[in-house]
Amino acid sequence: MKAKPIMDDKSGKLILVPILAVLFVTIGYQYICPAGSHSCPLQNGEAPRGVSLLSVGFQDGDDFVDQDLEDDNPAKLPSQFNFTQRDLDRRVEFNMKGDDVIVFLHIQKTGGTTFGRHLVRNIRLEQPCDCKAGQKKCTCHRPGKDESWLFSRFSTGWSCGLHADWTELTNCVPVIMDKKEVQRNKRNFYYITMLRDPVSRYLSEWKHVQRGATWKTALHTCDGRSPTQDELPTCYNGEDWSGVSLVDFMRCPSNLANNRQVRMLSDLSLVGCYNLSSMNETQRDHILLSSAMSNLKNMAFYGLTEFQRKTQYLFERTFSLRFISPFTQINSTRAANVDLSEPVRRRIEELNFLDVQLYDYAKDLFLQRFQFSRQRERREVRLKRREERRWIHERQQARPWLPRRRMEASKSQEKEDNDFAGTTEDYTSQVSRW
């Protein structure tokens, strides 16, 4: 009769243990994954993700699945231009340990500051860039060498002048690199840049100038000299153009904001630099646009501000480098908050008619390159899986005593090892709004 209370007591303890365990797990989960957090896959209704291959170098054939890339990726994207396979295939054998150099052409208000920080702070490298707190520049040396593999604002500074353009960089970079580094081997320079929708970029530059920016220390060097005051008159009197209205900003005929992207990507020596009297305006415009299109197409890489994740994807595939954290698309910018009437928008497009044509061309080529790379990657993944299935089949034939269930488990494990998902780390805090 005395044994019954003891059994009831044990039963109560057995019931209490799982209840306490559930409470402990629930409290722990709420602590790790608070409400509103996007860092917990199960809380957001997602399937658990595997270990990301961002911790290792990029390898061709990685089965990369990114929902942001999949959603707006049509089966076949029509093109207005006749691009060749060579135009679309931009994979380069970038040798960071050798003599290769990435040169970043930074056009104002195209998201170049954000992209430039990605280059020095967000790439998985054997020897990461050394970025010290309070310093604007980072040291980006090759592994085991006192040589730079990156020529950009945040690595070498404005060594060729503030926001140097294509004309300046192609003439200046080789000379600067030879002066800075004793070893004068023949280098391979890979030029890259960022472009932006012309209207948004123009409005962003206006807002920046309105806050006091001038870029008046830019050299604009062409054919060995800077333009004279007559060739490039200033749009304002005084130290800056603070408080300028959009109307006044658009009225200045020598405003370098007009068609800035075409001017900075073209070879200005073809049109007599800033001497507008060297040829008629129509001929000059045609040469500038053709030159900008050609230089852009032949660059190792360019990205578009409006397509951050695709920009990240193409850069990684072009240079076989991998970013640590994903790019973030920020659409709430100062330019987006400007309330434009339709006549004003049309006027901005007229002032930037060359940039509008260049951007249409650049966007078409960019999306074609993205689609080409995705399709090639899918083919490589299918071939890899087909080889895996063939290997498993041959292995099963050679070892018929191996249980089928064990073979299927092995195949499933191999697939999990090969697949990976993008990192979910929030990078918004490191993105500067342009």
Image (spheres, rainbow, N blue to C red):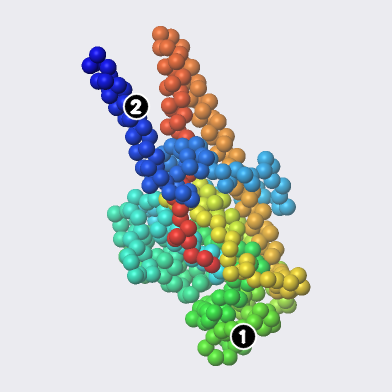
Q: Which circle marks residue 235 in the picture? A: 1
Tell me the residue that label 2 is attached to: 15
Identify which residue is drawn at 52% across, 65% down: 433
The picture places residue 364, in percent across and down from the top left corner, at: 67, 54
Which is more toward the observer, 60 or 97?
Answer: 60
Query: In this rendering, would 272 be left or right of 158?
Result: right
Secondary structure under tag 2 reads helix
Tell which residue pokes out farthest to the right in this image: 343
Vertical arrangement, residue 119 with respect to residue 375, above or below: below
Which is more toward the observer, 187 or 382?
Answer: 382
Label 1: few (<14), some or many (≥20) within 10 Å? some
Vertical arrangement, residue 226 with respect to residue 118, above or below: below
Q: Amino acid at mark 1?
A: Cys
Q: Amino acid at mark 2?
A: Ile
Q: Quadrant of residue 193?
A: bottom right
Rounded to the nearest angstrom, the CA distance separating label 2 from label 1 is 81 Å
